[in-house]
Image (cartoon, rainbow, N blue to C red):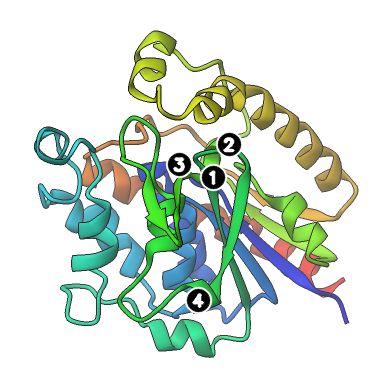
Amino acid sequence: MKKIGLVVEGGGMKCAYSAGILDCFLEKNISFDYSIGVSAGSANLSSFLAKQKERNLRFYTQHIKDPEYISIQNFLLHGEIFGLDYIYGKLSNSTGKDPLDYQAIVDNPCEFEIVATDSKTGNAIYFNKSDLRQDNYTPIMASSALPVFCNPVPFLGCEYFDGGISDAIPFQRALKKGCDKIVVLLSKPRSFVRKPESHKSLYSKILKKYPQIIKAVDHRYIMYRNQIAKLKRLEAEGKLFVFAPSKSIKLSTIAMDPVGEQSLYDLGLSDYKMQEEKLLQFLAD
């Protein structure tokens, strides 16, 4: 029996796109044997595995209005744009405004891995479902801690940054975990080409305590381009099925635009419908 994997790229607020596709999977009862997410992609996956349809959408279109979620005020008070403690703690805890169904994730037979980046080595670290606890979603916070915009997240004696700087599209990890076929949800159109990071002097100064993270940020565009090239080869060979936004909706990683977020989510819904027949054939073969 084939092992089917699901990979969800990060991308901050651009991940409203994959939230739409994941809700289509829920509606159509499409499940997977293994899943891995990066940054906001791991957060999207947690709601998917908990089978909480439209929960992700609320985070992109409703909770985004909360100043504790994302704001300059957060940066001035806490040194980070995104309020990770608020998003994955206060909002998501069992007593929060939009709780994550932790037990449903535990009960879901699908494997779940979360990518973060070790602050000392700059290497990818893979947490799994057993690293999560009721009302303690620190691995997802660690995966989402974008350098400069967020402080590193401490967990089990180490500090971690966003997984996207070390393994942005972890389909190779899914292959290593024994997946025969993999569905990949990208957050950017196929035409996207990652460029070298700008403002090197600024982020080098802010991250001076983390030389390996600076190095990872410097080389991120090379890593990403290499992953995209290999992804396209594997897609052509029939091993990967890729969803990517069919049109460009200009939103930044830290966008605070509920209307734009809804448009991205809706694009995910329409792109799924366009590719549903091909996807079902891919999964059945």
Q: Residue at x 78, y 54 (%)?
A: 240
* Residue 49: assigned label: 4
* Residue 118: assigned label: 1
Residue 145 placement, left or right of 279:
left
Residue 147, image x and y in percent? 39, 33
Q: Toward the viewer: 218 or 186?
A: 218
- Report the Cα–Cα distance between label 3 and label 2: 19 Å
Q: Amino acid at mark 2?
A: Gly
- For label 3, the residue is 11
Q: Amino acid at mark 1?
A: Asp
**Quick check: 282 above or below 237?**
below
Query: Which callout, 3 or 2, points at the residue further toward the start of the chain?
Result: 3
- For label 2, the residue is 122
Query: Which callout, 4 or 1, points at the residue further toward the start of the chain?
Result: 4
- Report the Cα–Cα distance between label 3 and label 1: 19 Å
Residue 54, image x and y in percent? 34, 69
Q: Tell me if mark 4 has few (under 14), some (14-19) or many (20+) residues whose alpha carbon lies within 10 angstroms of its own.
A: many
Task: Please tell me how many numbered marks the rendered image carries.
Answer: 4
Q: Toward the viewer: 246 or 84?
A: 84
Q: Amino acid at mark 4?
A: Leu
Q: Amino acid at mark 3?
A: Gly
Residue 16, image x and y in percent? 39, 51
Query: Which callout, 3 or 1, points at the residue further toward the start of the chain?
Result: 3
- Report the Cα–Cα distance between label 4 and label 1: 25 Å
